[in-house]
Amino acid sequence: MTPRSVIGSFVRAFGVVVGVVGCAAVAAAMLVALGLPAQGRADDGPPSEPTLIPEPRPSTLVVALDLRDPVRQAGVVKGRDVILARGLEVDIAREIAQRVGVPKVRFVYVRPAARLLAAKAPSWHLGIASIRATPSAAAAADLSDPYLDTDQAVVLRRGLSRLANLGELRVLRSCALRGSDGSRALATVVSPAVNPLLPSSAERLFQLVQTGVCDAVLVDAGDVGRFLAGRGGLLGPVNARVPYGNGYALSVTRGGPIAAAEVGVALRRMRADGTMHRLARKWLQIDPARLRVLR
Amino acid sequence: MQTAASNHVSVKCRAFLVVTACALALPGAAGAGLQVWFSADGTPVPVVRNGTTLRAAVEQLIAGPTAAERSRRIRSAVPPGTSLRSLTIERRVVTVDLGARFAAGRDEAALQARVGQLVRTVRSVPGVLSVRILVEGGVPIGLFPGYDLRRPIVTPAERVFSTPTTRDLQQRLVDLGFLAESGLTGIADFQTSTAVLGFQKWANLTRDGALGPTTVAALIRATRPEPALRGPGRRIEVQLRRQVALLIQDNKVIRTVHISSGAGGKTPRGSFRVYRKERYSWSVPFKVWLPWASYFTGGVAFHEFGSVPTYAASHGCVRVNHYDAPMLFGFAESGTRVDVFDEAALA
């Protein structure tokens, strides 16, 4: 055995020892940090919930997208990352990152969107993908306050003047896309007195209100700008909106560096200082939040 | 040993390069030049360009139409200055990797059209089965409406403007209230022609009853007729200048009917009520049966008549065409208000 190989063996052995001791020390430190009892004690009563200490603030906020819609979020998937990301929800995520003090945003692609809620140990901090703030979604993940309403905008045919209340909408021939939130809102919120029409294509829905077969159509308030685009003069006013659902929320990774409450504060500030209105006008043409609520 | 392995890799690399080079030089239609697809008035159009390779076709597409082509209203939705990063072919599937500019802009129609142009151009090269589109080396998702670019594209997805069918136009006439549902036959028959006359009168078009280009264009942009007067419940407006009757319920026009009123202003103007209804009414002065007669003042009635020309031609009654007369008779219950006026004078 040469002197060099002896030294080499010694260094390797020392490395293994240091590694084992180091790992043990790190594990012990983690246990202490997490507040886990080192050994069970019978007189402690029921075990308390482990206190999760938030991770230190990252330099990059990782945001999961599902890229479903050119207006809300779209981009180019390269590996797992999304480059050239754009859309309303992309801009909202960037604004939130700035407001919670994280300078950089990295977008990752996650599909299907259900994974945003179901993932056990997600590798992202926030998920934004038109997640409806339903009780089941809230049970699966921490949800922020809604950033966009799921209310239904009421578009009238030409020749009708603005409606004052839901009662006036009830007596009109209303229409919505079959199987849409609009059709559900008709059934649960409007309860029309005249049988509604439920066409199966958006094009036919438009024709029905253009030709006056339908007096009013219900369209997702977030999509009403697109519904009207390039069709000036063929339809009447966007009257108001019918309240429906709890809105769209971000999913916030539990125990991650950003808390849902922080995102909520950022969203409230964005709403208060007009940022949300500006983004809605940029991407949706019409800010749904500015439409009058029909009651 | 190491040398042998690297030689093997080198041979494989060379073979790959040779295959790729051959593929990129895939010839266009022999001697016919390349087809590059642009659009004119929203319709895809091919132009023939010099060149023989697939790469040349894509480069010509990116370069856009020439000045002469632009003067012929030929346009491209591909943004000028888009870079072609790479172009490869494997098993007849062409992969085109473009720069970020290809995805620039928010006009959904333009984004959709540029993918269509690229797919048509590449697919027009013989032997190409489908096209995989990458942007900056990645897969664009959601950027190009109507396309799922996670898979190679075989057929362009954008809607190409096509002439509506007769049935489409009949449906539009039904929706607007000019034609009864029974008129949805798919055949441009006399009932359709009668409904078209009603529409042409309403829209102030030439009254020929034919679905010509001007009438079709007007139909596509048309909205439901609006009553000239306001008033509750069921009523009828006879608009003498247009020669139409509007059947109105709670200020919504239910149907618009092609009529012919009294020649030389013989139909009295004013506000009346339907006071007598007869399934067959014998006209004493003219000695003729008048089917579906609804009298609203003196001896003046709405009734069916064989000849309903595009102008005022009757002795004072309001002639209604064969298809609409029974419906109007049912609508005009006793007591229904009838307003007869010259809408131009009203304005």
Image (spheres, coloured by chain):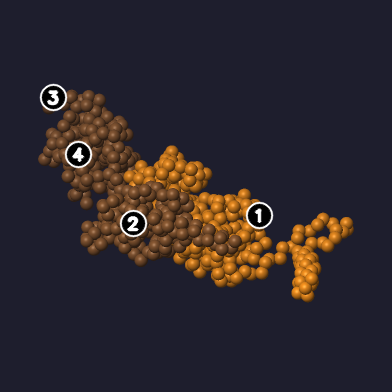
Q: Chain of mark 4?
A: B
Q: Identify the residue position indicated by label 2 in the image.
A: B53
Q: Amino acid at mark 4?
A: Gly
Q: Nearer the viewer, mark 4 or mark 2?
A: 2
Q: Is residue B312 visible?
A: yes
Q: Identify the residue position indicated by label 4 in the image.
A: B209
Q: Amino acid at mark 1?
A: Lys
Tag 1 near tag 2, CB within 8 Å: no
Tag 4 near tag 2, CB within 8 Å: no
Q: What is the drawing colour of chain B?
A: brown
Secondary structure under the numbered disc 4 in the rendered image:
loop
Q: Nearer the viewer, mark 1 or mark 2?
A: 2
Q: Quadrant of residue B18?
A: bottom left
Secondary structure under the numbered disc 1 in the rendered image:
loop
Q: Chain of mark 1?
A: A
Q: CA distance from mark 4 to mark 1?
A: 68 Å
